[in-house]
């Protein structure tokens, strides 16, 4: 073989080796992504279910915070975690300070001169209660002062090594808020897996679970108060606060589409939920759900649903897959007496295509540019009732959404609203209202609300009423 031939073979061999190396790197990255997704699916979803079950036996806020710290530590797979809260008995006018309120694992002492790591939880907690951290001091103090999370993935490269105790290799500090009010800071230290460091996915999860736990902890504080009537009223207030936090503050401004939304709970706290969740720059997910039951239990189910919806939107791969995974998570995190129906519509403003799926929910009403009305209800069971191993199937439909079209998503509180003769408002009346058309989505919403009120007269509202209208101009 000539030298040229040998050189050619050598070049081809080098290229083949380089290609195999790139393939191995890609496979390693995919395995890492699968590990992260599996970890989040298998562990994070159990958090609210296990946490809320334990709350039933806790009446003291100190015990509650300890419960919070343990569950956060387990879900995040951290070696240790502490919760710092604002000093409650500080003198008037004194600078705000944080001090330890709960601890899980062998949490280090964040004092400049201390390398102390205590083995007994009660000793660590007692020390933390007397370790005051000024606002802006160190990592925990800066997270509190700036009200921003801090991630130090690898402390070896941290700019201020004096702030890091010995044997701390990775940490996260997350400010905890309820209703926009700063409550404290939760800090997680070191991953349990040897050699692993906290990453952005861990921080995002930490932020989400800290918020959910803070809301549930607030309920415990209410149950600890004396007086049954006052406790009930305060519980309803917190339930209303939770519900307000679940629903969007405003409808989105999104391309050629216009939106309107309406929600009226039958009780002080409702179990209906709607949301607008961006998937990427061109796709928007519209979600409408109706939880079984009413009041605070239904509202808490909606809180879990919202968390899962936002988590799954980050890796959306189609409506059937989205509903399948959402059902799996809700089934694992709720008892079988509680379930919800849900509709999801995904709009693509580049292709002007709509994909719609339903999990036992009311039909989607579509009005075409020519005024024709269609009611679409793809097959799919309610969520949280049945396990995946029964072979559940969720269907979806895809259709164009041209200019002049309109969509109406609603809960059965609209169509099943009753009048004095015990008659339902019905789907047909709703279809006729949509067929008449309105200049704006708010106009159609107002027309439906007015028609339902006129139909029901003085009959009390028996179920939550929620709807979202979308038009394209």
Image (cartoon, rainbow, N blue to C red):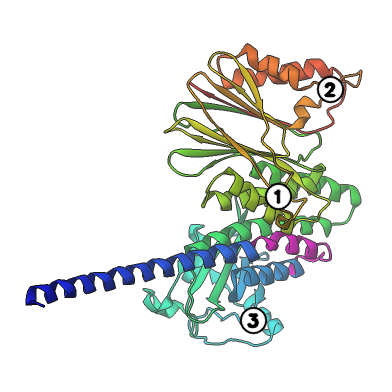
Q: Do callouts 3 and 2 mark residues in contact (Cβ within 8 Å)?
A: no
Tell me which numbered mark, 2 or 1, is placed earlier along the sequence.
Answer: 1
- Circle 2/circle 1 CB separation < 8 Å: no
CA neighbours of label 2 inside 10 A, class few (<14), some (14 to 19), many (20+): some
Q: Seen in the image, is 412 located left or right of residue 458?
A: left
Residue at disc 3, secondary structure: helix
In space, the residues marked 3 and 1 are separated at their CA atoms by 52 Å
Q: Is residue 149 above or below residue 171?
A: above
Residue placed under numbered mark 2 in the picture: 424
Q: Which residue is mark 3?
A: 127
Q: Which residues are magenta?
A: 43-62
Q: Are marks 3 and 1 in contact (CB under 8 Å)?
A: no
Is 334 or 442 nearer to us in this picture? 334
Dot 3 surroundings within 10 Å: few (below 14), some, or many (20 or more)? some
Name the quadrant containing residue 47.
bottom right
Image location of residue 184, percent across then percent down = 60, 62
Residue 25 location in percent, x, y?
37, 69
Q: Nearer the viewer, residue 46 or 229?
A: 46
Q: Above or below — where is 415 with respect to 44?
A: above
Q: Main secondary structure of the magenta part?
A: helix
């Amino acid at each position: 073989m000539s030298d040229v031939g040998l050189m050619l073979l050598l070049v081809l061999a080098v290229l083949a080796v380089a290609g195999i190396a790139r393939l191995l790197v890609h496979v390693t990255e995919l395995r890492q992504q699968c590990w992260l997704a599996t970890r989040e699916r298998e562990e994070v979803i159990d958090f609210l279910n296990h946490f809320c079950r334990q709350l039933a036996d806790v009446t003291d806020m100190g015990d509650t915070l300890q419960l919070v710290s343990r569950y956060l530590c387990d879900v995040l797979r951290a070696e240790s975690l502490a919760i710092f809260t604002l000093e409650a008995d500080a003198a008037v006018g004194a600078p705000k300070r944080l001090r330890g309120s709960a601890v899980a694992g062998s949490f280090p002492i964040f004092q400049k001169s201390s390398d102390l790591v205590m083995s007994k939880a009660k000793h660590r907690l007692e020390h933390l209660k007397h370790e005051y951290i000024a606002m802006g001091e160190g990592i925990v103090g800066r997270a509190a002062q700036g009200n921003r999370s801090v991630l130090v993935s690898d402390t070896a490269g941290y700019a201020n090594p004096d702030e890091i105790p010995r044997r701390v290799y990775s940490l996260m500090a997350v400010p905890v808020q309820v209703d926009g009010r700063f409550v404290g800071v939760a800090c997680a230290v070191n991953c349990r897996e040897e050699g692993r460091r906290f990453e952005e996915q861990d921080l995002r999860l930490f932020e989400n679970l800290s918020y959910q736990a803070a809301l549930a902890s607030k309920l415990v504080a209410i149950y600890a108060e004396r007086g049954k009537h006052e406790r009930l009223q305060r519980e309803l207030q917190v339930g209303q606060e939770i519900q307000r936090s679940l629903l969007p503050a405003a409808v989105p401004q999104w391309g050629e589409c216009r939106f309107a939304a309406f929600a009226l709970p039958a009780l002080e706290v409702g179990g209906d939920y709607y949301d607008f969740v961006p998937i990427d720059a061109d796709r928007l997910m519209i979600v409408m759900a109706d939880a079984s039951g009413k009041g605070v239990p239904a509202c808490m189910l909606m809180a879990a649903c919202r968390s899962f919806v936002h988590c799954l939107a980050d890796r959306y791969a189609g409506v059937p897959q989205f509903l399948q995974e959402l059902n799996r998570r809700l089934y694992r995190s709720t008892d079988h007496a509680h379930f919800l129906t849900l509709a999801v519509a995904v709009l693509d403003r580049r292709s002007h295509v709509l994909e719609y799926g339903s999990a036992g929910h009311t039909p989607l009403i579509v009005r075409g540019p020519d005024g024709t009305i269609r009611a679409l209800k793809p097959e799919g069971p309610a969520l949280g009732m049945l396990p995946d191993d029964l072979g559940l199937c969720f269907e979806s439909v895809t259709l164009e959404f041209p200019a002049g079209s309109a969509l109406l998503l609603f809960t059965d509180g609209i169509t099943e609203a009753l009048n004095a003769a015990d008659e339902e408002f019905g789907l047909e009346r709703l279809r006729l209202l949509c067929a008449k058309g309105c200049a704006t989505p708010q106009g159609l919403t107002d027309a439906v609300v007015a028609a339902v009120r006129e139909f029901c007269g003085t009959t009390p509202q028996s179920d939550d009423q929620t709807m979202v209208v979308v038009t394209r101009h």
